[in-house]
Image: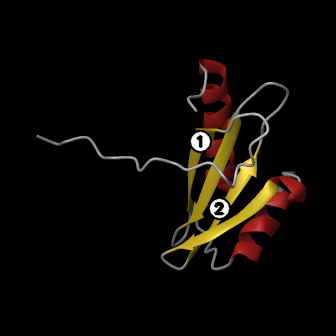
Amino acid sequence: MPLIVTEECVAQRHQVRIGTAFSGKATATYEEMRDKLTSLKYPAARIHRMPDFSGKPVARLDVRVGAGHLALEVTGLNKSVMVRAFGAPEGVSVTEVRLRPELSRPTS
């Protein structure tokens, strides 16, 4: 589900906030990731474990408010995280949303 412009703006703020908090810190387990996210005041009930990606922890954050659709996927990397924003329809768990692979643009 596509995000509206306002949600994209809010997503960028979350991405910077989370990226900064994890910068330079290794996150080896989902539990470490969850603890860091809860220290950023994201409610534990809105943090959902996802299958690991190549041995790296993955969590999804349900940050929907009101009629909003914003959700985030946080994937642990060596000493940081990748944060991807996506839309989740009302009444659907963020864990059920299937994300399309993001393809890199051609360089030539």
Q: Where is residue 103 in the image (x, y as percent from the top left)?
A: 33, 47
Relative side of 45 to 99, left or right: right
> Callout 1, which amino acid?
Ala
Q: How far apart are marks 2 and 1 (CA)?
A: 17 Å
> Callout 2, which amino acid?
Phe
Is disc 1 surrounded by few (<14), some (14 to 19) or many (20+) residues within 10 Å?
many
Count all numbered tags in the image, as a single digit. Answer: 2
Q: Given contact means CB atoms under 8 Å apart, are the residues at marks 2 and 1 in contact?
A: no
Which SS class for mark 1? strand
Which SS class for mark 2? helix
Would you identify the image quadrant in which residue 26 lies? bottom right
From the image, tell me which residue sits under label 1.
85
Is disc 2 surrounded by few (<14), some (14 to 19) or many (20+) residues within 10 Å?
many
Point out which mark residue 73 bears: none
Relative side of 64 to 80, left or right: right
Task: Give the residue displayed 69% in from the left and 55% down from the top.
Answer: 95
* Image quadrant containing the N terminus: top right
From the image, tell me which residue sits under label 2.
22
Relative side of 106 to 82, left or right: left
* Image quadrant containing the C terminus: top left
Comparing 101 with 18, the one in front is 101
Residue found at the far top of this picture: 5
Comparing 23 with 37, the one in front is 37
Task: Give the residue displayed 69% in from the left and 46% down from the top.
Answer: 17
Q: Where is residue 86 in the image (x, y as percent from the top left)?
A: 59, 40
Q: Position of residue 13 (x, y in %)?
A: 66, 36
Task: Give the residue displayed 68% in from the left and 61% down from the top.
Answer: 59
Q: Which comes sooner in the sequence, label 2 or label 1?
A: 2
Disc 2 vs disc 1: which is toward the camera?
Answer: 1
